[in-house]
Amino acid sequence: MAEIVLKHIVKKYGDGFPAVNDVSLDIADGEFMILVGPSGCGKSTLLRMVVGLEDITSGDLLINGNRVNDLAPRDRNLSMVFQNYALYPHLTVFENIAFPLRLAKGQHSEEEVRDKVTTAAEMLELTEHLERKPSNLSGGQRQRVAMGRAIVRDADAFLFDEPLSNLDAKLRGQMRTEIARMQRRLGVTTIYVTHDQIEAMTLGDRVAVLKKGVLQQCASPRELYDQPVNLFVAGFIGSPPMNFLPAKVGDGRLSLPFGDVSIGSDLAGKVAGKDVVIVGLRPEHIKDASLGDVSGGATFNATVDVTEWLGNEQYAYIPFEPDPAVQAMLEELDRDLDGEGMRTQMVVNLDARSRIREGDDA
Ligand code: ATP
C-alpha cells in the first residue's frame, strides 16, 4: 500500500518548455486518482515520472514518505498497465500473468506462482483461457491479462495509462466496471490517466484536471461538476459541455442572447462594476416549458436548429447572435480555452418526452 506525494513536480523535455509545470498532489493510501485533460496536457508524462520511466526535472516525488526521484522503476514497487497491453505474444496467458513473478528470480516457489496466477485469473474471469496465446484473445481479454500481470505483483500502487482506449464502447463500459470492482476489492492506491469523461467521473475518488502541464483543480467528481474553479474546468467536465453565454450586466438583471433574467442581490454583488460577463449554464438545467416542470426559472423563446435523439434523452441546438458588445469577451474566452470557448449556439439536454423538433419555435 502506498501514499504518493508530488511536490512542485516539473518536467522539461529538450525544447525547455515545461510539459508538467509545478504540479503538487497528495494521493492517499488506497485512493483512486484520475489524471484528465486534453491531449498534450502532460498527464502521461506525469504518470511516467511516478513510475520512473521519465526523469523528474525538479520537485520531489515521495512514496510512503521516502523521496524516490532517483530510484530505478523496478525498485519503486509500482505496477503499470499500458494502453497497448505490452503482452508477450509467444507466452501463454498463464506465463504472461506469471511474468513479473518469474522476473523476481527465486523469490516465489512454483506453487506460489500457480496460486497467485490462478487467483488473479479467477478474479478477471480468465481461468479458461490460461493456456491460450494473446493472439487468440479478444481486446477485452488481453486487457484483463495486462491487469492480471499488475495484480500478481502485490505492488504498492497501480498506474494505468489510458488502458481502455483500444476497446469498443460496450467493452469499455464492462472493463470500466471491472477495474472499479478490482480496485475496491484490492484497495490499492491507483493513478489512472484518461481523456474519457465517463471514466474520469465514475472511477475516481478524486479527479485532477490538467491544462498545458498545469494542475487546474483536484477534487471529487461531484465538486468538479458543481463547483469548477475556472472556465476551463467548467467547460471540460460535462457532456454535452456547459454553455457559455455572454451577458450584458444591467440593473438587477442580466441580458442573455435569449432575453433578460433578473438576478438576486448575491449575484448582483458579484457582477457589480462589470459591463459584460459569461454565464455558465449546464444543458440539463434548461427545460422544455411545455412539459410543465419549470418552476422559479426564467422562460425564453428560441428557434431550435438541430435535435439529436438518444433514446433516454435528446439534445437540441439553439444558435444565437452574440451582441457586438460581447464579441471581444468571447474572443478572449476562445483564446483562453484553446478554441473551445467560442460557441455561438446553446445546447439543451431535453427530456426524452419533449416533442420539440428541428425548426420549432420553442
Ligand atoms: P495524450 O492524451 O495525447 O497522450 P498527454 O496529456 O498524455 O497527451 P504527454 O504525452 O504527457 O501529454 O505530453 C505533454 C507534452 O510533452 C506534449 O506537448 C508533448 O508533445 C511533450 N512530450 C511528450 N513526450 C515528449 C518527449 N519524449 N520529448 C519531447 N516532448 C515530449
Image (cartoon, rainbow, N blue to C red):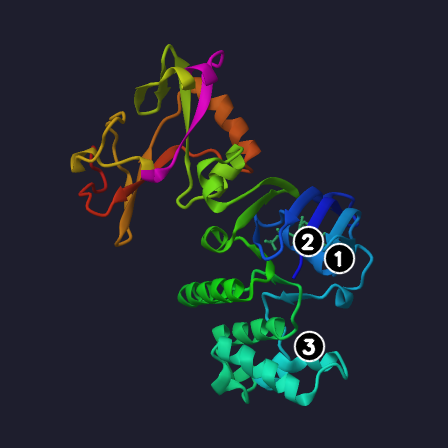
**In what quadrant of the picture does the C terminus appear?**
top left
6 in magenta: no
Question: Above or below — where is 301 with respect to 218?
Answer: above
The residue that disc 3 covers is: 100
Q: Earlier in the sequence, mark 3 or mark 1?
A: 1
Image coordinates of residue 338 in percent, x first then y, are 56, 38
Q: How many numbered marks, from 0 up?
A: 3
Q: CA distance from mark 2 to mark 3?
A: 24 Å
Callout 1–callout 2 Cβ contact below 8 Å: yes
Ligand 1 within 8 angstroms of badge 1 C-beta? yes
Q: What secondary structure is marked by label 3?
A: helix
Between tags 3 and 1, which lies in front? 3
Q: Earlier in the sequence, mark 1 or mark 2?
A: 2
Q: Earlier in the sequence, mark 2 or mark 3?
A: 2
The residue positioned 47% from the left and 65% from the top of the image is 181
Tell which of 109 and 151 is nearer to you.
109
Image coordinates of residue 67 in percent, x first then y, are 79, 53
Q: In the rendered image, is residue 91 in sight?
A: no
Image coordinates of residue 24 in percent, x first then y, are 68, 43
Q: What secondary structure is marked by label 1?
A: loop
The residue that disc 2 covers is: 45
Q: Amino acid at mark 3?
A: Pro
Q: In the rendered image, is residue 217 in sight?
A: yes
- Span of residues in magenta: 268-284
Ligand 1 within 8 angstroms of badge 3 C-beta? no
The residue positioned 66% from the left and 45% from the top of the image is 25
Q: Amino acid at mark 2?
A: Thr
